[in-house]
Image: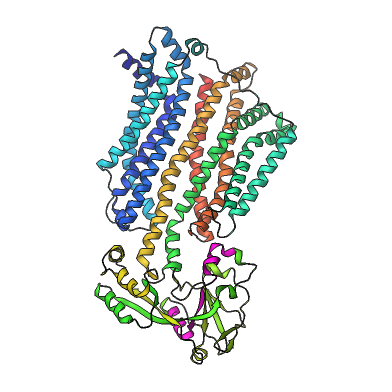
Amino acid sequence: MMIFKLSYQNVKKNFHDYTIYFITLTLTVSFSYIFNLLKFQPFMKEFSENSVEDLTRILTQLSLSITLIVTGLALYSNNFILKKRSREIGIYLMLGLKYSQVHLMMILETLIISVISFVSGCVLGIFGTRIFDLLIIKLLGLKIQHSTILFERTAFINTLFTFFIIFVLISIFNYFIISRANLINIVKSKRAILKKRKRKGIINYSVICFVLSIVAIIYFYILMLKPNIDFTDTSTEIAFGIGLLGHIGIFLFGSSVMSFLISHNRKKMYSGINLFSNKQLTSKVGQNGILLSIISFVMSLTLVMLNLGFSAHIWIDENLKYTAPYSISVSGIQPDVSIDKVTNYIKEQGYTIEKEYSFPLYRTDYTLSYFLDPHKTYKLGDEYAFFEDISTRLIMLSDYNKVREISGYKSVLINQGEYLLHADKAVMQSIGNCREVKISSKKLFNPNQLIYLEPLNDSRGVIGGGVTIVVSDEDFINSKIGNYDISLIINTKELRTDMLKSDFESNSDKGLYNYIASYSGGHQVILRSDQRDYNLKQASSYVFTGLFIGSILLIVGASILSLQQMTETMDNKRCYEIMNKLGVKKADVHSSIFKQIFMYFSLPLIVAISHSIVGTIAMSSYSLMTVDAHSFIYSTVISSIIFMIIYIVFILFTHERCKKIISD
């Protein structure tokens, strides 16, 4: 009873020391509850069953990862508390308390704070669930099915389990720290003045290394910005390693460069206590270069995920234009197959066909490489190898214009003896000058270099792969091309997403997908709802990861920086006492602390924003989550603003706590 009473009194007296621990655990519990509740929310009905299973698995993996990360932060925060209260613990031991009793006291203190954090986190999670659900619905462009579920027993139990793991690990950590502590060392514990980092070599060495680090980062950026980057390629992995070394080098050698630049501005350097502030800052950055580089790297990943997440809705709709512009599209149908069988079956399933059109696609003797500029094929990357040996298809102008009409585009005209090209967006950047082509024995030209790029094609080439040759009906009639297959495009009046999904996922031969596939080889059938579900699942993984991992890692990074600043202020308290005796004003000391904290927080954030811009472009290219420039700028600005707001809160909080430490 005495130990419990003592623990309770200590919590009341030292609650401000537990602030970071309390905030971190509260936010972790709230985010865990929100994301454990996601799979039960009504909007998940808009996903297919397979997608829900995949996303649930992703959320489970994220929860496990976050539990480990937050546990590490909780241990770091707990270590700060033990260090600050080392003399107090030593006094308890001198007064006769056993190590086991001190350990029990610390467990009870941690339990009291943890229970308060858990309750606060659950309450915050219940109120925050609605906000997060609306945000996810907005980002993914989902429909609001029903009101948000605020409580679910399974989600609560999973959150409680996460909390229990963190608490047990902290208790074990406390036990080892206290049981191995030496009483004399605890009682005589003093705060060490921050030592000046010993530089190896002369300043020129650090400057050279810093410049080489910048060069390495630039090289990495250039490679990442290449079109169609392949992250599995060996050269990319090597470049990533070089970029990582450059990233670490910026923080390891940046402090020496900062010191070098500051020392050349003597007027500013010797103004007030700037000399002390600058020495403190450069020493902190130099000593903690590895830690800062890790935090900055994690921030970069977080920003990339948030950027992609905020662009998800735009990408889902934009991608459908180029992969599934029609409700149903079928290519590769053999000429002897009756198209009426396919359309009648679709009508029997309850769909009202608004527009349909079938047309022949003819094979030519040309391949894609004939139309490409050899000096630009590198822009295609792996796609070039896929398209290189594919026979370029030919379509009559009347059929081409009908497809354009169904898609909402104006008809085009070409003269007899001429041709035009319709190119996929990915191929256009590598096309050279349009040379003459021969259809049978007749030469056709493209004197005006006409190339159309409207999204008429699906992901399986319903009007041809890469490029398609369009010729006038008169020129085609006089030719002798006979090798062809049929393409079919259909737009239905009903969206009927649920029926399309059930048809696609059915193992029965009666399913729409299987029925059509039986006439066309299977892989050449594209259902818009299926493609949208795939896009939605991929975008959701970025949104969930960005919001969940991003939010937690952002808090973790800011908390570590805050704890480190408070720890170092505590270690250097003697310095500030001496400055006070020398007559330095409190306002100047507080200003010095704020400058150090602000710069210490800003450096990893600035580097992270730079990395994230390049990383977002590279990832959007690799994952095909390509968005327009306006959307990219919008998502980057929003993510950066969110980071800055949270960091400003942590900076102000850290500044106040550091002032409190000095005043105590």
Q: Quadrant of residue 172?
A: top left
Which residue occupies 58% across, 53% down?
224
Q: In this view, does 522 lie above or below 87?
A: below
Residue 125: in magenta span: no
Residue drawn at x 61%, y 51% is 221
Residue 300 at x, y percent in the picture? 53, 45
Does residue 50 appear anywhere in the picture? Answer: yes
Q: In this view, does 12 lie to the left or right of 226?
A: left
- What type of secondary structure mainly makes up the magenta span? helix
- In which quadrant of the rendered view does residue 193 lie? top right
Quarter the N terminus occupies:
top left
Q: Which of 430 and 315 is in front in this view?
A: 430
Start-end of magenta stretch: 379-404
Q: Residue at x 36, y 54 (%)?
A: 137
Q: From what the image shows, is residue 75 above or below residue 155?
A: above
| Residue 50 drawn above or below residue 34 | below
Nearer to me, 231 or 117: 231
Tell me residue 554's x, y (percent).
47, 40
